[in-house]
Amino acid sequence: WAGTEYEWSKDVKRTLENVFKLKSFRPQQLSAINSTLSGQHTIVVMPTGAGKSLCYQLPALVQPGITIVISPLVSLMEDQVRSLTNKNILAKLMTSTSPKEETQAALNLLKDKDTPIKLLYVTPERLAKSKRFMANLQKCHAEGRLQRIAIDEVHCCSQWGHDFRPDYKFLGILSNMFPNVPILGLTATATSHVLTDVQKILNIPGCLVIKSTFNRPNLFYKIVEKPTSQEDCLNILEKLLKYRYKESTGIIYTNSIKDSEEISGGLRKRGLKVGCYHANMEADARSKVHMKWHEKQYQAIVATVAFGMGIDKPDVRFVIHHTISKSMENYYQESGRAGRDGLRAECVTLYRMQDVFKVSTMVFSSVGSLDHLYGMVKYCITGNMCRRKLIAEHFNEDWGSDDCNKMCDVCCNPNSNTREITLEAHCRTLSDILENAEKQDTKLTAQKLLDAWFLKGPVNLRHKGKEPNFSRTLGEDVIAYLLVESYLTEDFHFTAYSTISYIKKGPNIHLVRDPEFTLKMPVRKYT
Ligand code: ADP
Ligand code: ZN
């Protein structure tokens, strides 16, 4: 689709350069644009930040008629309408909370044959609830002025996706209601299960699916053992900023406002120029910090995830996570802000087990499941698998023979980095401790389980004749491993702490009593 010349090809190129002021397309953008311009129903799968919006904004300008953009994210739509308006493109927005006059004005524009309105953004609720809007749209279609329907976050149609929205179900009527109008779905969710479901719900079976890779070859991925004290964390960050990332700019993500203030304060005390950014700051204070960082007056911005939208800096050389992200999706997006210029950049995560429990309480209370978080933990504790391969697998992308090119800490040090430990005896000890606690009707937090384990021993088990150095950190890794591999489970209580117990069904910790069974965990050596 990208290599062929079409009647619209010259227009497409001209619009890219003159209106969007961009030099070239990113991978798969041109294929998606050609496919939708040819009238095909198309689904585009691209990671966040890869440039999905261009895939409908640009076609909207090279063909006559109106493009309807359905999106659940009002703030993103507002951003887009603003930026299109700045380019002198007539674009409007309709949500269920828009003032009446605005809605009326948008509806009138839809009716008006002589207006050049190009893009109309609507929320799915708005579309599902407004009969008048649908009537106007049908009229528009009958007059041949409905160019295409773009559906952003199209995975929301599917119950299998991670954020199903009931109003998206309604979108299934569109393909029959507006025959010959191409539908363009866009998402960052690549699971084939979800994609098949989406095609079924939208009634566009066998539509063209254009996927771009999630691999970011210029990003180096690395895990660093996180010390227990904030002071020691600051030492690590100070060193990185003063030496390794001297002269470059980047982001340090923290898990809380308190952390972002402590870290930025601590680094400033050590003579570094850093800014702090979180949601509790006034809007103009935030944009001031952003600006100073953009102009390289700050080497780093220490931020919560509130720092995300509108980062348009191509030369972010490092993204450090002081605490793990809530999910692999979040991590991919946050770390992906590095190296947009295609030059080498580094993504470093400070990991320790306690943080899993710090984050799990938060994640559990918001999504009620820990699968997403455990995906992130798996990425951190892997001892012998390329981090890039783990990311690819997480996003259901075939990694195949694609090479990491030594762009992760594991591949950089494939041999000395790992050894396997047999967990059988450890599991037996842990299982005894948990069983005893259960008998006495006490609940153990991860921390207490670890204490009891190290008290009880024998932790220094023989390993192939050698005495392994079984540190507390390694003990933490074992517990994290048993959690993400579903041998242990976290139970949540109304207060903000979690306790650990066995999983009664499925893979069971009792299995380790089977003499044939040995559980092996690959162990990483921190560098
Ligand atoms: P997505 O919707 O996939 O998350 P966006 O459409 O918001 O991504 O685009 C992310 C950023 O990439 C925007 O700042 C956009 O201007 C920029 N961008 C998109 N396409 C290109 C391109 N071909 N060349 C350079 N920058 C681009
Ligand atoms: Zn690798």
Image (cartoon, grey):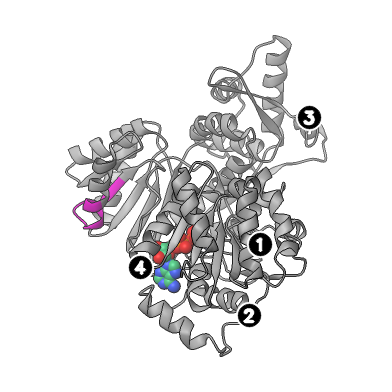
Q: Secondary structure at mark 3?
A: helix
- How many marks overall? 4
**Residue 312 horizontal side relative to residue 264, left or right:** right
The residue shown at (56%, 38%) is 477
Pointers 1 and 2 in contact (CB under 8 A)? Answer: no
Q: Work out whether mark 4 precedes mark 1 in sequence or the reverse, and give the earlier one.
A: 4
| Residue, disc 4 | 87
| Residue, disc 3 | 510
Give the amino acid type for the residue marked by disc 4 in the picture.
Answer: Lys
The residue shown at (64%, 41%) is 371
- Can you tell which of label 3 and label 4 is closer to the viewer? 4
Can residue 4 be seen here? yes
Cα distance between the residues tagged 1 and 2: 22 Å
Q: Magenta residues? A: 291-301
| Residue, disc 2 | 38
Instruction: Tell me if mark 4 has few (under 14), some (14-19) or many (20+) residues whose alpha carbon lies within 10 angstroms of its own.
Output: few
Rendering quadrant holding ligand 1:
bottom left
Q: Report x, y in % for residue 154.
A: 63, 56
Q: Report x, y in % for residue 216.
A: 49, 65
Cα distance between the residues tagged 4 and 1: 29 Å
Instruction: Tell me if mark 1 has few (under 14), some (14-19) or many (20+) residues whose alpha carbon lies within 10 angstroms of its own.
Output: some
Cα distance between the residues tagged 2 and 3: 59 Å
Cα distance between the residues tagged 3 and 4: 64 Å
